[in-house]
Image (cartoon, grey):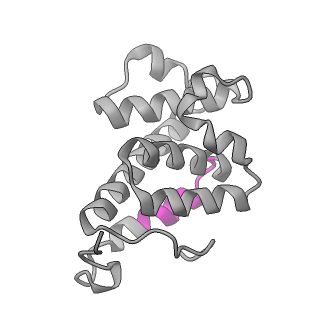
């Protein structure tokens, strides 16, 4: 597959707002390891090779296990995901697949997160979905990402 557009070739300012959002999310109180787990799962759903490469490398760098990353599509049946992780994964999957979350899924977040954190988590899910779509449309080439590159 041939890359259509490299981010470096995109019009100046195209992704400035997205990088600003990334900076905001990094300053949030959300656990970076939990965020990268969610980003990896959403990227699996969307089939974004570039994002899967990035989030896999970031997750391993943060101490995530290969087992958990490889079995993430089957998280519902794996005993080693916490209740908090399950709530986030259910929410992220629902927003990704249906652009909505029913009350039970939303309420499942409440024992673990404040309303402000749920708002930040919602933004993080929307953000990775946007990155997935941009990278898929541009056909960004996976394999060359270095941890901390962005």
Q: Nearer the viewer, residue 150 or 113?
A: 150
In this rendering, the count of numbered labels is: 0
x, y (%) of residue 59?
A: 66, 55
Q: Is residue 117 left or right of residue 46?
A: right
* Residue shown at 63% from the left, 61% from the top: 58
Quadrant assignment, res 77: top right
Name the outermost residue toward the right: 63
| Residue 92: quadrant of the picture | top left
Q: Is residue 113 above or below residue 149?
A: above
Majority SS type along the magenta span: helix
Position of residue 107 relative to residue 121, above or below, is above
Query: Going by the image, does 109 lie left or right of 119?
Result: right
Residue 147 lies, in percent from the top left, at 63, 71
| Left or right: where 89 falls relative to 5 | right
Question: What residue lies at 30% left-to-right and 69% top-to-bottom?
Answer: 1
**Magenta residues, as a range?**
20-30
In the image, is 48 to the left or to the right of 147? left
Q: Residue at x 36, y 55 (%)?
A: 132
Residue at position x 53%, y 48% from top?
40
Residue 11 picture location, percent across and down: 22, 82
Q: Residue furthest top?
A: 104
Residue 117 picture location, percent across and down: 55, 40
Question: Was residue 17 drawn as part of the magenta stretch in this picture?
Answer: no
Q: Which residue of the protein is positioned furthest toward the front in this rendering?
A: 1
In depth, the one of 79 and 87 nearer the eye is: 79
């Amino acid at each position: 597959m041939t890359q259509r557009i490299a981010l470096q070739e995109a019009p100046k300012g195209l992704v400035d707002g997205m990088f600003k959002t990334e900076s905001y999310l990094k300053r949030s109180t959300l656990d970076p390891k939990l965020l990268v787990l969610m980003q990896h799962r959403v990227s699996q759903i969307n089939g974004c090779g570039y994002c899967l490469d990035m989030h896999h490398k970031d997750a391993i760098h943060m101490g995530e296990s290969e087992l958990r990353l490889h079995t993430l599509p089957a998280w519902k049946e794996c005993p080693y995901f916490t209740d908090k992780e399950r709530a986030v994964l259910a929410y992220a999957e629902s927003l990704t697949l249906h652009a909505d979350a029913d009350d039970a899924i939303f309420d499942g977040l409440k024992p673990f997160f404040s309303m402000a954190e749920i708002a930040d988590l919602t933004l993080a899910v929307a953000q990775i979905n946007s990155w997935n779509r941009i990278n898929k449309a541009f056909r960004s080439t996976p394999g060359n990402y270095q941890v901390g590159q962005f």
